[in-house]
Amino acid sequence: MTVVLNQLALGFTYLDQTRTLFVYDGNHHPTSAINQSWNIGLSVWENQSRSESEYNGLGNRTLERESNWISGAWLATDVDTFKYNGLNQNNQSVHWDIPGNEVTRDDISYDGSGNLVEVISYVFFGSWFPLIAM
């Protein structure tokens, strides 16, 4: 685990402001990051937000979940999933904005040299509808 601490300097005194706690898996991939703020009145660290990631056996990130600390529990706000082709290139990502209940998807194409050729974005309204092709 790694901690990044942000403090406010007041003369020769430092006041804790925020910190981020990072957790890594055995392959050094970041699996969790928790953002906390210091409550000076209660003298405790309070959870604010959390990011979690999962990886496949090749080290590609397959899931990312963002959450906020609400009423003593983690409430997921966004979930992203990623799929890869046989060359370990991300060829599809799906994003779910939980509070807005909006789901979008990007389908990604590459040429034979591995160069990005096209990204087609979709939104889900009972079925997938294309938005933009780049």
Image (cartoon, rainbow, N blue to C red):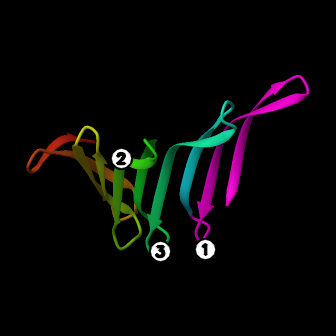
The residue sitting at 34% across, 58% down in the picture is: 81
Secondary-structure class at tag 1: loop
Which residue matches tag 3? 58
The answer to whether residue 53 of the structure is visible from this angle is yes
Q: Position of residue 65 (x, y in %)?
A: 41, 53
Q: Position of residue 53 (x, y in %)?
A: 47, 60
> Between 83 and 26, which is closer to the camera in this rendering?
26
Highlighted magenta segment, given as a residue range: 1-29
Which residue matches tag 1? 26
* Kind of residue at disc 3: Leu
Which residue matches tag 2? 78
Is the residue marked by circle 1 packed among few (<14), some (14-19), or many (20+) residues within 10 Å? few
The residue sitting at 40% across, 62% down in the picture is: 114
> Between 73 and 104, which is closer to the camera in this rendering?
73
Is the residue marked by circle 2 packed among few (<14), some (14-19), or many (20+) residues within 10 Å? many
> Between 91 and 67, which is closer to the camera in this rendering?
67
Decide whether residue 86 is among the magenta residues.
no
